[in-house]
Amino acid sequence: MTEVQIDAQRKRLRNTFLVAILILYFILLIWVIVFKCNENASMHIEMNRAMTIRERLAYKAIPFKYTIERLKAGAPLETIATIFNVFIFAPMTMIFRYLKIKKLTAVLIAAAVSMAIEILQLFTGWGGYDISDWILNVLGALLGLAVFALFTRMSHKAQFVTVAICGFIALPVDIFAIINTVLNFPH
């Protein structure tokens, strides 16, 4: 094999690996965001389902109003949820950029995925629709672009390792959330 063929083969293998990470990431992302459950999950699901779509839409339509109220009330989980909503979308745009998807396209895809999840939550009552989540997710996607830009000056091998690691930043959180969901899923 020539050096060119070896490089092409490495590139195909790398891209296949990243696409596999991206697919796993999307599955875990939807699972964790839509089906997250905790000790109050049953109550929140019942409350969401008891509301009409119009009531759900109006309940958290003003960006960050609910978040600020919860933070003022001393709800530590709201701080964690806010940070989670930013960081959960950063790996997506990093992987997209490594796959040579344009910056704007990467952010638009992330924004569309986040909006689709929010709309799913709005219409089903699962999870919790919140326009603030969408804003935080898009900020996370932009953060992913910024982090990726920092790594573009590295060697290709270092970039690949970094993006692979960043692709799994959310994995421990996702695994914890899935275990928590299974243990606390409303029967």
Image (cartoon, rainbow, N blue to C red):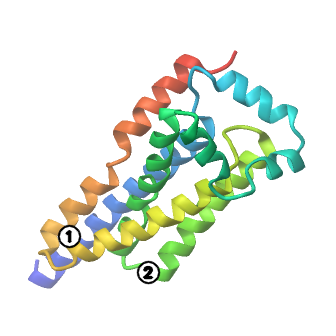
- Work out whether residue 99 or residue 174 is closer to the camera in this orientation and state it: 174
C-alpha span from label 2 to label 1: 24 Å
**Label 1 residue SS:** helix
125 in relation to 148, above or below: above
Q: Is residue 36 left or right of residue 161?
A: right
Give coordinates of residue 182: x percent, y percent.
54, 22
55 in relation to 104, above or below: above
162 in relation to 124, above or below: below
What residue do we see at 66% from left, 58% from top?
A: 63
What residue do we see at 44% from left, 80% from top?
A: 103
**Mark 2 or 1, closer to the camera:** 2
Quadrant hosting residue 45: top right
Quarter of the picture containing the C terminus is: top right
Q: Is residue 69 left or right of residue 102?
A: right
What residue do we see at 13% from left, 75% from top?
A: 154
Quadrant hosting residue 100: bottom left
What residue do we see at 13% from left, 68% from top?
A: 157
Quarter of the picture containing the N terminus is: bottom left
Could you classify mark 1 by the number of other residues whose Cα lies within 10 Å: few (under 14), some (14-19), or many (20 or more)?
Answer: few
Quadrant hosting residue 159: bottom left
Residue to which mark 2 is pinned: 103
Q: Is residue 9 visible?
A: no
- Work out whether residue 40 or residue 65 is closer to the camera in this orientation and state it: 65
Q: Is residue 172 left or right of residue 120?
A: left
- Work out whether residue 36 or residue 96 is closer to the camera in this orientation and state it: 36
Residue to which mark 1 is pinned: 10
- What's under tag 2, amino acid-wise? Lys
- Work out whether residue 34 or residue 99 is closer to the camera in this orientation and state it: 34
Give coordinates of residue 9: x percent, y percent.
22, 72
Give coordinates of residue 37: x percent, y percent.
58, 28
